[in-house]
Amino acid sequence: MILIKNIRWLTGTHQQGKGPVAGEDMKKLPLLEHAWLLSDGDRIAAFGRMDVMPEIPAGTEVLDASGRIVMPAFCDSHTHLVYAGSREKEYRDKVMGLSYEEIARRGGGILNSARLLHNTSEEELYEQSLVRVEEIMRQGTGAVEIKSGYGLNTEDELKMLRVIRRLKETTPLTIRATFLGAHAFPAEYKKDRDAYVDLVISEMIPRVAGEELADFIDVFCDRGFFTPRQTDRILMAGLKYGLKPKIHANELDFSGGVQVGVKYGALSVDHLEFVGEEEIALLRGSETIPTVLPGASFFLGLNDAPARRMIDAGLPVALASDFNPGSSPTGNMQLMMSLGMIRLRMLPEEVINAATINGACAMGVEEELGSITVGKKANLIITRPVPGYEFLPYAYGSDKVERVILNGVEIR
């Protein structure tokens, strides 16, 4: 057992804890002042105010959180953190004026990562990815969704997904795996893109499902990538094998990706730099979670997702890092909360809800994670001494995390 006592603010104390939190409710951050929390094994056993703390069993480890916030660990629902090497030279091209699409046409971008991954062994890919996993855990992430998509052929896609499975087995993170074979078109399919879609459907999806390597299926439905018709075919095939859809949509233009995602009951539609009234109305009538990735739009100099407009329209917005080598080379969710405030005009309460309970909903783990709720996993952040929860997104660039507890055990 672990007892955390003298907590200045215990935040995210949702009694039911299932979410998502939408619209005006995102401005509300349930909390207790001067609180305590008890974990037993890997679960939250109880919590309350210090003036009504019960007698604690002998042998319980006691942590003093005076002046500190205790909150749920972050749930990062969109990453590509399994990759080989890095692409900093391409960012130089970006600074020199080349667009994301121009870099891709020159063989850079996703195709460059695919070449690097093809020439990297599964063991080395695991070791590189483990370093990133350990980094995001220290920064407060307790649950993460990881996509494939840098293989672009059957064997390399399977290699990525096996690495994701190994990370799930060897780290305390809660991990969900997403098959993203439809991330880009390999060069050899440049003149016959539908043939690559056929390969994804007829060969990749059955192999992925046969080895039970993925929870979700994703498609990059956007200008210059997969069309709504191709996305429709791929999602339909994935559903037949039990793979729940998620969608990359509307990062570069109005793509129709939101419409296809809602049609197939996607768990989330992500990016959303281009969103209009039609997309908002469709999302409002669905259970699909709109997920914004401010790190990518910031790093690439793209339009910012209209998170303020979506929240004001009553939607439940989630916030994720998009950790990847080309458009968001960081998984720091503290920074994502800051960008949510600075660039997307979200309030402190909104970014915290978006990075915890709504992030959990966007990766299907809200029954276990994302809030301070009795019976949920004890995935917790203990901050450094701070003046209030508003300080967390305000002090951008500073590491406010002092301790991280995952599954009831402190990460050292």
Image (spheres, grey):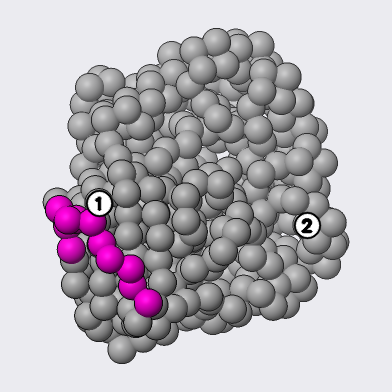
Is the stretch drawn in magenta largely helix, strand or loop? loop
Q: Position of residue 326 (x, y in %)?
A: 40, 49
The residues colored magenta run: 52-62
**For residue 402, which numbered disc appears in the image?**
none
Question: Mark 1 belongs to which amino acid?
Answer: Met
- Residue in front for this viewpoint, 246 or 203: 246
Cα–Cα span, label 2 and label 1: 42 Å
- Residue in front for this viewpoint, 18 or 250: 18
- Residue in front for this viewpoint, 188 or 309: 309
Q: Can the viewer see residue 290?
A: yes
The quadrant in which residue 155 appears is top left
Q: Which residue is mark 1?
A: 1
Q: Which residue is mark 2?
A: 283
Residue contact between numbered discs 2 and 1, judged by CB atoms under 8 Å: no
- Of the two numbered discs 2 and 1 in the rendering, the one whose residue sits closer to the viewer: 1
The quadrant in which residue 218 appears is top right
- Residue in front for this viewpoint, 266 or 402: 402
Query: Is residue 60 in the magenta section?
Result: yes
